[in-house]
Image (tube, rainbow, N blue to C red):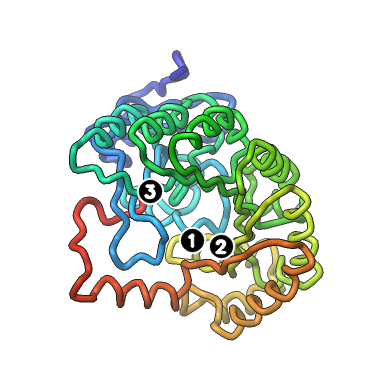
Amino acid sequence: MRWSGQTLEGDSVQERTRALVGMAGLVRSVRTPEFQDVTFHEVLAKSALNRVPAASSMPFSWTVNPYRGCSHACVYCFARSTHRYLDFDAGADFDQQVVVKVNVAEVLRTELGRRSWTREEVALGTNTDPYQRAEGRYRLMPGIISALADSGTPLSILTKGTLLRRDLPQLEQAAGRVPVDLSMSIAIFDEALQKAVEPGTPSTAARLATVRAAADAGFAVTVFLMPILPWLTDSDAQLDAALSRIAEAGAAHVVHGALHLRPGAKEWFLAWVEREHPHLAAGYRRFYAHASYAPAGYRRDLGRRVAALLPRHALRSTEDVDQPEHRARARTRALAPAAQELSGQGALF
């Protein structure tokens, strides 16, 4: 279960690990031939529930993230900068130094059992993917799902991982007790580009098959068609083909939005563009050198084009809420006199 016999040896490696992770809860660091170049740092977490900041535009108030760092290695991942809090870098370390909260289910169950818990929705997959490949070994999600359902807490899951199918029977049972929302992130429908941009993820076809399995199990599945990459995945023909395949897989709803690049992700992605698509480098610098979001005009045009395509595929849709306009409205609400004072961790990880 915990990769017995694969613990890293050597004082220099152990000293570097402790210096980088900087966590009193570090149990050990593990490497295995199944995950080339990836080190898993097993830690004992003191808390599982994270409070979402008041100014966030996210439609949920609490998150749980059993992993930090992600072997999906998506070059655009917005969460890369969070690895710096552990003294890791936001580039290769984010892909290769994965923190595993081995006791997260037990800690979560304790927190959900407190009299102060009001059973607000808990979101999974907001920072790093709970169904990344390591979940096949650590099996943290069944305990998390059980703790949430047993406490009467609604939950939502956003993933790129086809390992979600393993837990569909348990999620069906949970949905008989609490609201359960399932979402699959599928940004790229060209196989070669998908392997280049998201090298550690399951294929697009495998993710669509997972959407179909979840839909057949009775879930109204949402597909996150995002990030849409300027000049790489944003033509009308590409968008139409993507929506067609999403609809054929049985999805009920689509969330769409243009690429945004926060510090950490920005440097990593722009270096990738310069290396892999140098003819697009000037355009990406023009869009993102001084901003995290694509220009407002581009985003409006993209939204109009997606909206025009949706009726033929009978899909409901929502634009990405993590955009400047939505964030500004959220900040206004948070500063209103009637806004509730929030406590707990102000982070999505």
Q: Secondary structure at mark 2?
A: helix
- Report the residue at 56% width, 34% height from top: 133
Name the kind of residue labelled 1 in the image: Ala
From the image, tell me which residue sits under label 1.
265
Image location of residue 131, percent across then percent down: 53, 37
Say few, some or many: other residues with alpha carbon within 10 Å of mark 3 (under 14 / 14 to 19 / 20 or more).
many
Three-letter code, disc 3: Glu
- Label 3 sits on residue: 121
In this view of the protein, can residue 131 be seen by the observer?
yes
Q: Residues within 10 Å of mark 1 (few under 14, many from 20)?
A: many
Q: Looking at the image, which residue is at 26% across and 38% down?
A: 47
> Where is residue 73 drawn, in percent x and y?
56, 47
Q: Is residue 230 above or below residue 19?
A: below
Q: Left or right: 120 with respect to 335?
A: right
Q: Element under label 1?
A: helix
Q: Is residue 322 above or below residue 141?
A: below
Is mark 3 in CB contact (under 8 Å) with mark 2?
Answer: no
Question: How far apart, in angstroms, are the residues tagged by discs 3 and 2?
Answer: 32 Å
Count of labels shown?
3
Q: Which is more N-terminal, label 3 or label 1?
A: 3
Distance between mark 1 and mark 3 Cα atoms? 28 Å
Query: Which residue is disc 2 drawn over?
Result: 269
Residue occupying the point 59% across, 40% down: 161
Q: Does residue 127 appear left or right of residue 185 in this picture?
A: left
Marks 2 and 1, how far apart at CA: 6 Å
Q: Secondary structure at mark 3?
A: loop
